[in-house]
Amino acid sequence: METTGELCLGQVVSSKAGRDKDRLFFVIDIIDDQYVLIADGDLRKVEKPKKKKVKHLVDHSIINDIMKEKLEKGEKIENIYLRRELEKLGII
């Protein structure tokens, strides 16, 4: 399992600061123990994810198992899928 501290692929996180403060994202890639790539399918598309330091993210302890499995297998994730999953959670 690829993790960075407590973060793992497919996990819901939010930004602590910046213009994307309090927005929710999914972790779509782990670069190293300090950086991850995040996307929400709206402001940040899968094609151009945001590189973010782990210390600037809030962990929400919600992991989308289907997305995690797809990311681990290297399958493509659609932007609409990210948006719908965040809507299902009642967050956006």
Image (tube, rainbow, N blue to C red):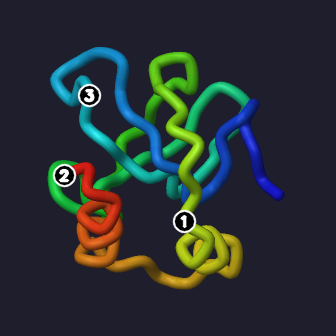
Left or right for 55, reference 85: right
Q: Is residue 77 above or below residue 49?
A: below
Residue sitting at x 23%, y 76%: 80
Quarter holding residue 15: top left
Q: Which of marks 3 and 2 is nearer the N terminus?
A: 3
Position in image of residue 92 (x %, y %)? 18, 52
Circle 2 packing at 10 Å, graded few (<14), some (14-19), many (20+), is few
Position in image of residue 24 (x %, y %)? 32, 42
For this orientation, the residue located farthest to the front is 90
Observer-nearest residue: 7 or 74? 7
Return the residue at label 3: 22
Mark 3 or mark 2, which is nearer to you? 2
Position in image of residue 25 (x %, y %)? 36, 47
Q: Earlier in the sequence, mark 2 or mark 1?
A: 1
Residue sitting at x 83%, y 58%: 1
Left or right for 66, reference 89: right
| CA distance for labels 3 and 2 | 11 Å
Amino acid type assigned to the residue bearing label 1 in the image: Asn
Numbered tag placed on residue 92 in the rendering: 2
Q: Which of marks 3 and 1 is nearer the N terminus?
A: 3
Return the residue at label 1: 64
